Image (spheres, rainbow, N blue to C red):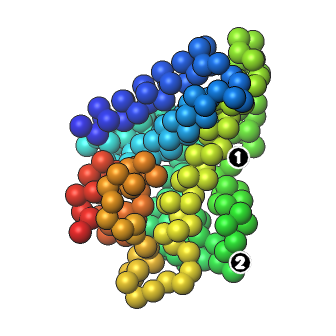
Amino acid sequence: MGLIIAFLIVILWFLNLLYALFYQTLAFDNGWVYVQILLQTWLFTGLFITAHDAMHGTVSKRKSLNFVVGFVATFLFAAMNYRMLLAKHKYHHDYVGTASDPDYKTGNQNFFLWWFSFLKQYVTILQVVIMAVLFNVLLLRFDQFRLLAFWILPSVLATFQLFYFGTYTTHKLPHTPSMEPYKSRTLKRNHFVALITCYFFGYHYEHHQFPGTPWWKLYQLKK
């Protein structure tokens, strides 16, 4: 089932992007443009959540398939280095909410400062070069404003979505006794809100408690 769900997310992301680039009218007074951007943002977030499941080995029982799915999903998200993500995510779980956690920011936990610090952990020069090359190749076929609106903007918005619901609100100070031993908060029980905000990833205490549970089963752990 994990492979099927991963495949569906990738296909939906691809098909919706193609539809937006080829057929969606790009006009500020067209409400569907904003719906399209929000939908593509959610699907970009789904790509990363899929890669996250692969990191935990929950897409497939075969390690090699998890690696392939994680590699493809992170590349489609923004040409990210999956091996680096995999290594740093292990540190996140081992040292959650401490100075050794690559996703955590000690000191000033201003949202934008932390988001920028979060991005610095994962953005590489090679990634920027690859994205720049892809953008210029796609310019041979698509208008730059369509690419910015339906490809670049949703990917950037997805970083905010992932950061806000998966890191900032769940791990920021103060760390209360109810957050121990994972220094993690969790959303109140509302499966619809949890799904549309970040694929149940807001049930974050449950994720750290049972990291071997795929995203689409996290709601079952919520009491």
The residue closer to the viewer here, 219 or 118, is 219
User: Residue 71, how many percent across, how many down?
Assistant: 49, 37
Q: Is residue 68 left or right of residue 36?
A: left
Q: Which residue is tagged 2?
A: 108
Which image quadrant: the N terminus?
top left
Q: Earlier in the sequence, mark 2 or mark 1?
A: 2
Residue 176 sits above or below residue 184 on the image: below
Q: Is residue 153 left or right of residue 184?
A: right
User: Residue 55, how many percent across, how many down?
Assistant: 42, 50
Q: Is residue 147 left or right of residue 190?
A: right
Q: Give neighbour class at mark 1: few <14, some 14-19, many 20+ (Cα, 10 Å).
A: few
Q: Residue furthest top?
A: 141
Dot 2 amino acid type: Asn
Does any portion of residue 130 appear in the rendered image?
no
Which image quadrant: the C terminus?
bottom left
How many numbered markers are drawn? 2
Does any portion of residue 136 appear in the rendered image?
yes
Q: Residue at x 64, y 27 (%)?
A: 30
The residue closer to the viewer here, 60 or 14, is 14
CA–CA distance in space, label 2 to label 1? 24 Å
Q: Which residue is tagged 1?
A: 124
Q: Residue at x 77, y 22 (%)?
A: 144
Label 2 SS: loop
Q: Residue at x 42, y 25 (%)?
A: 11
Q: Residue at x 75, y 17 (%)?
A: 143
Dot 1 amino acid type: Thr
Q: Is residue 213 left or right of residue 85?
A: left
Q: Residue furthest front?
A: 29
Label 1 SS: loop
